[in-house]
Image (cartoon, rainbow, N blue to C red):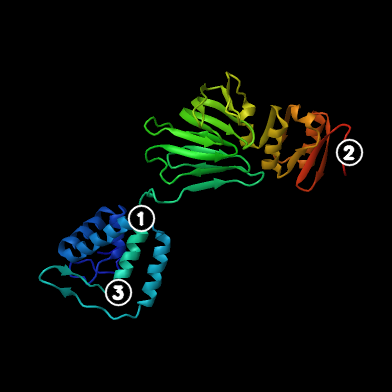
Amino acid sequence: MTHDGSRPSDASASAPDWEAVARFLAGESSAQESARVEHWFAAHPGDAELVSRLEASLESVAAAGVDVEGALARVRQRMERAAGAPRLSVVADTRRRWYAWPAVGLLAAAALLFTFVSLHRAPSAAATSRTYATGTGQRDSALLADGSRVILGPRSRLTVPSDYGTAARSVELTGDAYFDVRHDAAKPFSVRVANAIVEDIGTVFTVESDAHDTTTVSVLAGSVRLRATNGAATTTLAAGDRGSLTASGNVRADRAAVVPADSAWTHGVLVFRDASIRRVAGELRRWYGVDLSVADSSLLNQPLTATFRGNDPVDQVLRNIALAIGGRVERQGGSATLYSSSGPAIRR
């Protein structure tokens, strides 16, 4: 067998082309190469048995959750140490056949099978989950294995488990995200965030959350089911509906309330409509890296309606927020404090 013409392809060749064998097992061979591999196995049953044992070992390693990349590194080290090892002869026994390959050749076979087969196959359940994360003021997008698209807001994190798409499609979110879900009734899509679960019924929707406040879902297309993780409260939202779940577990649905501003953050525009200062503080932390606190508790009840661009200077944003709620702001580095109008003057 040969892939690049550097090795003989006839049945009398002294050793198999392990790269071709690995491609064959990974399903990446051309029709011509597959025929050569099958011809080799037919002419060399010992090779076929060896490959069968190696592949069985590979399956058991994957099932046990072994670090494949680490194993590969160790195999390569052994290959380097064995580079000068003498070749071993083939030993035959009337009771059973045992093929003792040259040390380097056997290790190379194992390494290639690990590389081409294990890493080309679909991840096993033992594989680790994948996490997408953004920093302060950053937005990013991700395309999931099923074709669903996600846009993450600033300082947000999406965790996709290793078995995503096997029986179900469930992800975990911290922060804000826009989901354009590829619908599959047989494998429902759901998002777990804080104390809420958002279940797709074929849709495009956004999720905005804060660990200390309300989780808000705006449905742009299709429909979703919003429910508390404890199952005590639930509601179904259709296109145009906005739903919210408070930290205390109360669910609310506002029908036909969604406006373009609900997804404006995906384009770098931050829109507040009657937002609590606690909510505003969470978004300022994500977008500008500033921790906002309130010195006067009466300001906590002042809702904010305002629009900012993600690249607006943070001092300008803070001043506008203070003016909108009738207060003053003092900022020192990454911290800012809101005072009532009668509070201390703003430091310049």
Q: In front here: 97 or 102?
A: 97
- When the figure is inspected, residue 255 is found, relative to residue 248, above or below; the finding is above
Q: Secondary structure at mark 3?
A: helix
User: Which badge, 2 or 1, is on the more N-terminal residue?
Assistant: 1
Give the number of callouts: 3
Q: Which residue is mark 2?
A: 344
Q: Is residue 54 left or right of residue 169?
A: left
- When the figure is inspected, residue 171 is found, relative to residue 93, above or below; the finding is above
User: Which badge, 3 or 1, is on the more N-terminal residue?
Assistant: 1
- When the figure is inspected, residue 184 is found, relative to residue 20, above or below; the finding is above
Question: Quick one: label 2, few (<14), some, or many (20+) residues within 10 Å?
Answer: few
Q: Which mark is residue 233?
A: none
Q: Position of residue 110 (x, y in %)?
A: 32, 65
Do the residues bearing badges 3 and 2 touch, measured as CB atoms within 8 Å? no
Whole-number angstrom distance, CA of label 3 to CA of label 2: 79 Å
Q: Position of residue 346 (x, y in %)?
A: 87, 40
Q: In front here: 222 or 191?
A: 191
